[in-house]
Amino acid sequence: MTTNELEIVQSTSKKEKPSQDQVPFGTLFTDHMFTMEYEAGKGWFEPKIVPYAPITLDPAAMIFHYGQTVFEGMKAYRTEEGRVLLFRPEKNFERLNLSSERLSIPPIDENVVLEYLTKLIELEKDWVPSTAGTSLYIRPFIISTEANLAVAPSKTYKFMIIMSPVGSYFTGGLKPVTIHVEDQFTRAVKGGTGMAKTAGNYSSGYQAQANAKKLGNADVLWLDGVEKKYIEEVGSMNIFFKINGEVVTPALNGSILKGITRMSIIELLGSWGIEVNEKKISIDEIYQAFQDGLIEEVFGTGTAAVISPVGELNWQGKKMIINNHEIGDLSQKLYDTITGIQTGKVEDTLGWTVEVK
């Protein structure tokens, strides 16, 4: 077998698929998964689609000790005609390689891996749900597997893709959420791993998020790690503000993740003739704009939610109510357009979707 020849081993025992109206998030997985190995001096080899099953790792595998891992999140959508669409998957694999570079993980061939993913989805097409708001969540990830406690990059890796049918992110409709402005804990700093999609970035936020929820908030708005002054992300999403008719978002600075949805929002607004100002935005600036009655809309963007409107920001005892706790017109239009493109209801004039035949 050549290094790029895909081996497919089909499952002989198929799982029962969930009810369309009771699809859990991330706890039920498809019948098959993709795996590929890496060895220093040999490169990536043995691409396989195999039955979904546990994997075995040595207790000294470096992933357990030094967290050398990266991942992505993307979705497959079923249209009303039954077609299956991916949304900008090449951008996810491009970003996976950016994350890998930061974590000293060898790059994958983005085009070849996209072909492997397409083959996997072709095999699992019946797992793509069709109810409004549902999709097949796709999780590509790489872990370091060398059994070695030396503090250095691993010489072996495993690349995998697992998939899980998921329900609508907004079970009760698209409702604005309340956000706590975090000024104690730090999500990331410039020069760190904030621009990479790696495991530790997420678990390090749990304590701050738990504290915010105790105060009645849905999530946290992260400020920069140096001055605790400049806005970075909201939860695990990028954030946008509409202030006095202008749309602004924090500029990518080395600690902010380059979101695929963020990129798509900026490009979509540009196609509508609306320029997005990417810049440093201080929380003081936002509070002043609120006091002046200039903040019209605030929303987070990401794969899971697409658009998550913010109805309230709580900062140092100050409460900022955004648009009367109602979703803004621009937020709604962006949500409807992007989800429409993803599900084939809106014409894809920007060439963002890839059909899985």
Image: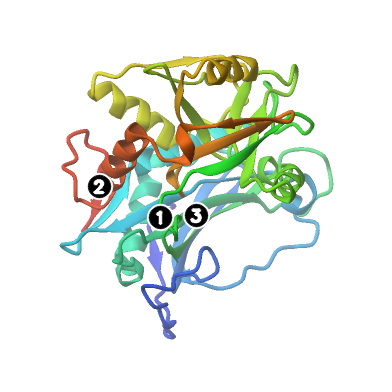
Residue under label 1, please give it. 173
What amino acid does circle 1 point to?
A: Gly
Q: Marks 2 and 3, how far apart in space?
A: 22 Å
Label 3 crowd (10 A; few <14 / some 14-19 / many >=20): some
Query: Which numbered disc covers residue 195?
Result: none
Q: Amino acid at mark 2?
A: Gly
Element under label 1? loop
Three-letter code for the amino acid on which mark 3 is drawn: Arg
Q: Which of pointers 3 and 1 lies earlier in the amino acid sequence?
A: 3
Residue 246 quadrant: top left
Find disc 2 in the rendering and name its residue.
340
Tell which of 3 and 229 is nearer to you: 229
Q: Are marks 2 and 1 in contact (CB under 8 Å)?
A: no
Name the spot of residue 316 as percent of width and height, x first: 74, 28
Which quadrant is home to the N terminus? Answer: bottom left
Task: Name the front one of labels 2 and 3.
Answer: 2
The local crowd at label 2, few if under 14, some if 14 to 19, many if 20 or more residues have their Cα within 10 Å, is: some
